Image (spheres, rainbow, N blue to C red):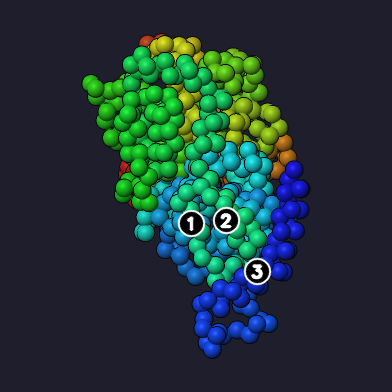
Amino acid sequence: MIEKVGLNSAISRLFIRKFLYPVRILAINQLLYPSNLYPYSDKEPPMTLKTVATTPYDDQKPGTSGLRKKVSHFQQPNYLENFVQAIFDSIGDYQGQTLVLGGDGRYFNLQAIQIILKMAAANGFGKVLVGQNGIFSTPAASVVIRKYQAFGGIILSASHNPGGPDEDFGIKYNTGNGSPAPEKITDTIYAHSQVIEQYKIMENTADIDLSQPATFDLEGMQIQVMDAVADYAQLMADLFDFDAIKSLFSNGFSLCFDAMHAVTGPYAVEILENQLGAARGSVINGIPKTDFDGGHPDPNLVHAHELAELMFSENAPDFGAASDGDGDRNMIVGNNIFVTPSDSLAILTANAHLIPAYKDKLYGVARSMPTSQAADMVAKKMGLDCYETPTGWKFFGNLMDADKVTLCGEESFGTGSNHIREKDGLWAVLFWLNILAVRQQSVADIVDEHWLEYGRNYYSRHDYEAVDSDSANQLMSLLRDKVTTLSGSTLGSLTVSYSDDFCYTDPVDQSISEHQGIHIGFTDGSRMVFRLSGTGTSGATIRIYYESHETRPDNMHQDTQEALQELIQLSLSLSQLQELTGRSEPTVIT
Ligand code: VG1
Ligand code: CO
């Protein structure tokens, strides 16, 4: 099927280029220019496929999830074009094949899409599936790549980073399985960006109208503007028991979903309100804005404060949730209770048998290294394999493709499954709603029962944002030296059982990823992890993650920061954070 499409489109491209195209250009030029002014001879129509000479930028190394920079950085001459051409030069033979294209709707999304469409045509793609108005949430892009067997996709997003002319933009490539490109491809993209001399683009072609579903031809390449929500919504209906969730809502269950003026608004309104019958207005901040209304579209209690205030008030609805800029993260909150993302992964795993799509088989579970070990406890009891990967969703793709894991999660408000190859915010919300519909208990009761059965993993992450890069690097290298000698030693009341700089060997392709974070584990099961963010755009962000395991039933409801106090103090003295960075407090605590 793919080959046939490829062949057909290759033939039609040839036909259009050789015969139709020159005729059309001539006709247009005759119209545009009176005959005495017509600047080109009949034999030499203006070429629209242009090869543009360019020089490399030295900073196009993709981070945890694609290349992220300030908008103005992306607007430098050829900056975007260089990176897109570097992607095309790194992904193999896509001639005549299909590319998926869309983004989270942030500032510069539409301009970038028009440029990428023209570059895709010039570089020989047969077809581009682009979301209406240039929109695809990250999970929806993954759905579309898989469903239409595309060669790959380009997703324009800086996720939870703020948007607007002075804020961030981002771009990443996903492979044909719908997964963020693995490191070997992102490394190749970077290598190409460092030696790039030219890029190809169609010139003198009008912008494509993306305002409604339609099909266009761009010099032989087909462009299909698609409803950005429909395929995603259909997949959700296939996975979950929509009837059970509908009756939950019709029985008066209340919900508040904060879309944070980011991409998830239209998806949430369609699925939660239109299809499942949640009350109108259950989705708040549902209109996507190019600058997220000046907010920081990161679904945590700090940034989703409108939701947080509501959920911890007397008028709290039964269930609250929020998603991020590109729709792949989720925060789950019950009436007066916050569910940590690490606990959420564990609870979804323990309750997967209640969900149509997961009731028959769970392969295994995976979590990123800094994520708490709550899921490990569940996996152990259920006899499931549990994998620990570096931070970033790209590391889960191989495990899912090889049927080693079904559910995956990260502490950074990311949860997902093998239904696609990205984390998926609304999917997690629907999973929770399906559990609540079946169990007919409150979020708080479900969490409490879970802790009683598996123990509670107190968990917190402290971020020190926009720290001077040199100081942050110095802190990490000092720690790297220290950890080699810590094992067996006593720190405060704790004894170190292991400490190293996390190195991951992919169990499927044996690729090795080094320096993925300093982790120090203690004999009582508690841990701390230090790493530098790979998604920020100003200075460095130091992330410190803390976890301790509590099994005494009477100690399940302590304040998290207090429960982790000893670890927090230890981390500060061990890393000399204050001396090296001048910071006495984290900028964000989650
Ligand atoms: C952060 C999170 C990580 C997540 C990544 C992308 O990375 O910690 O867990 O996968 O963002 O998420 P870092 O390197 O800044 O810690 V998103 O929502 O941008 O797609
Ligand atoms: Co995101």
Q: Residues within 10 Å of mark 1 (few under 14, many from 20)?
A: some
Tag 1: amino acid:
Asp
Residue drawn at point x = 71 percent, y = 32 percent: 402
Residue drawn at point x = 60 percent, y = 31 percent: 419
Residue drawn at point x = 69 percent, y = 29 percent: 403
**Helix, strand or loop for disc 3:** helix
2 and 3 marks in contact (CB < 8 Å): no
**Distance CA(mark 2)–CA(mark 1):** 9 Å
**Residue depth check, mark 1 versus mark 3: number of the one nearer the observer:** 3
Q: Residue most toward the left? A: 314
2 and 1 marks in contact (CB < 8 Å): yes
Q: What quarter of the picture does the C terminus occupy?
A: top left
The residue labelled by disc 2 is: 216
Quarter of the rendering containing residue 20 = bottom right
Res. 11 in view = yes
Question: In terms of depth relative to the viewer, which is nearer, 17 or 200?
Answer: 17
Q: Position of residue 375 (x, y in %)?
A: 54, 23
Question: Going from the N terminus, do you reach mark 2 or mark 3 first?
Answer: 3
The residue labelled by disc 3 is: 21
**Distance CA(mark 2)–CA(mark 3):** 15 Å
Tag 3: amino acid:
Tyr
The residue labelled by disc 1 is: 209
Establish if 304 lies above or below 51: above
